Amino acid sequence: MDVTSWVTEYERAWRAQDVPALDGLFTPDAVYLRSAYDDGLVGLPAIRDFWSDDQPFTMTWEPVAAEGDTAVVRVEVHYGGAEPHEYRDLWIITFADDGRARRFEEWAHWPGMPGWSSTDPGASD
């Protein structure tokens, strides 16, 4: 598992809107969860349909853990455009033997997210 190469290619493909590159990133039967309680997108066709996003963005990331076939990556994405917004994510990626992701979980947080406060994490907005 080469987490750095995988995330670098994911970011490159996302910036370029290179949807065919997903074949090299995800297994044909991969599961892609967009949030903690998401039912998940199952299979490359569903991931392809969802994945394309042409909004300009900046992205920083760093791996925080890797063990066996699973890695955790901390990601921060800032979108520009008419309505700028940002996300801080944890990605949990489970890799197949060939280096492609067979499971991708995204745990996204953003400023003003309901139920989160900078002073009291348990407070509701």
Image (spheres, rainbow, N blue to C red):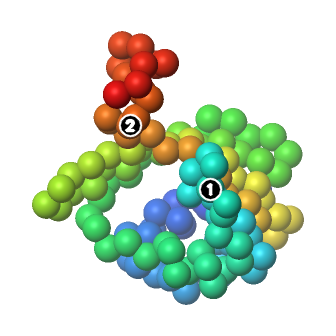
Residue 46 rendering spot, x and y as whole percentages: 61, 79
Screen quadrant of the C terminus: top left
Residue sitting at the far front: 124
Residue 124 rendering spot, x and y as whole percentages: 41, 25
Estimate how packed mark 1 is, as few (under 14), some (14 to 19) or many (20 or more) residues with alpha carbons within 10 Å. few
Looking at the image, residue 60 sits to the left or right of residue 1; the answer is: left
Q: Residue at 36% across / 13% down in the picture?
A: 119
- On the image, numbered disc 1 is attached to which residue? 38
Residue 79 rendering spot, x and y as whole percentages: 27, 55
- The answer to which quarter of the image holds residue 73 is top right
**Residue kind at label 1, given as amino acid type:** Asp
Q: Is residue 10 above or below residue 114?
A: below
Q: Residue at 63% across / 49% down in the picture?
A: 37
Q: Residue at 50% across / 74% down in the picture?
A: 50
Residue 74 in sight here: yes
Q: Secondary structure at mark 2?
A: loop
Numbered tag placed on residue 113 in the rendering: 2
- The answer to which quarter of the image holds residue 113 is top left
Q: Is residue 3 above or below residue 49?
A: above
Q: Is residue 68 above or below residue 58?
A: above
